[in-house]
Image: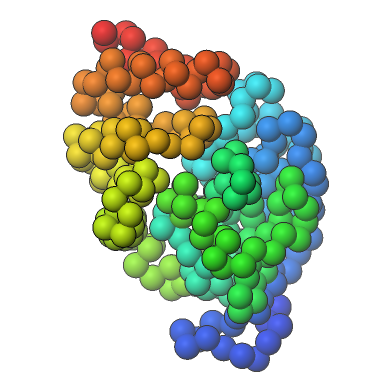
Amino acid sequence: MKNHVMGLIVCSSVLLSSAFAQNVRLTGNLGHEYQRMNNCGPVTAKMVLSLEGIRVTQPQAAAALKENNLDRNVSVNEVARYLERFGLQTVHRWAGNPALIRKLLAAGVPVIVRQQMKLTDDIGHYRVAYASDSSGITFGDSYLGPSVRLLDNTLERLWKAYGGEFLVVYRPRQQAAVKKAMGDDWNPYLNLAKLERISRAQIVLSPNDALAYWSLGRSRLLRGSAKTAAAAFLKADQLGLPAKHYWYQQEALTAWNRVGWYKLAARVAARNLRAYPNSVELLAANRVARARL
């Protein structure tokens, strides 16, 4: 195991007004590999470790991250805990944007994003950002290839269903640089308040935006307001979420169970289990709800 710090190559002398380089590329070997079935989380973790000079195989990462071969959903928290086993540190936040990714890449650290695989498909997917230029970000993608460049607008559209969720991965010695790059987003409370502001603004512009209501619910749930979160999640569900949404995100079920809306939680869990009967998270939420009916 090599214990080196990821660096960056500054590819342009042009600087943004916030004094970080636009064109950067992390050094190190990405170690890209195409995923086996439902292995985007394990392969993404493998790529991040490879950038750090840490070698693991896809089967090793999958065995550590997935409960069984039918487990499609690996959470960001599960990825974070796995990476931390190797001496790395992580910061899990929401409301990400391309400018923030550029700052973090300029600080010399990779960023894992959770988003849709394609605009035409609501399958959840992970990518790891390792390079940027003035108009796009380049990702290692376990399904689409080792060098997937997304323009800023496309990146944000793919990210919306997950509220701009991202995971920063760094060595302990890089913490000061990461904290500076993140600014207010380093503070989890301020980050969630930002997510709520963005969600509210989206709802004003589009009152029937189900994904904006979902992000509003998430920001409230994570700040301890289960009752208002439950109402926002209900509104999102009523407006209509993407078909596979609950395969990857179950915060609504958590909120509904927490406030005693067990019939609702059980009904929605059962509806989604018909399409994805092996979901560990949906099964767990359904058990909690039915035990209290």
Q: Is residue 115 above or below residue 14?
A: above
Relative depth, front residue between 190 and 177 = 190
Visible in this render: residue 222?
no
Is residue 270 or residue 89 the one in the foreground? 270
Q: Position of residue 218 (x, y in %)?
A: 33, 43
Q: How is the image coloured?
A: rainbow
7 to the left or right of 111: right
Asked if 235 appears above or below 129 in the picture, the reply is above
Query: Is 153 situated above or below 272?
Result: below
Residue located at (51% from left, 60% from top): 156
Q: Pinpoint residue 89: horizontal percent, then vertical percent.
A: 53, 53
Is residue 241 rendered to the left or right of residue 46? left
Residue drawn where x is 39% and y is 12% of the image? 287
Q: Closest to the observer: 157 or 249?
A: 157
Please identify the residue farthest to the bottom as the structure is shown: 13
| Quarter assignment of residue 170 | bottom right
Instruction: Say if residue 240 shows up in the picture.
Output: yes
**Residue occupying the point 47% across, 72% down:** 181
Quadrant containing the C terminus is top left
Give the x, y percent position of residue 227: 19, 34
Horizontal placement of 241 versus 262: left or right? Answer: right
Image position, residue 155 (x, y; %): 57, 60
Q: Residue at x 55, y 20 (%)?
A: 275
Tag count = 0
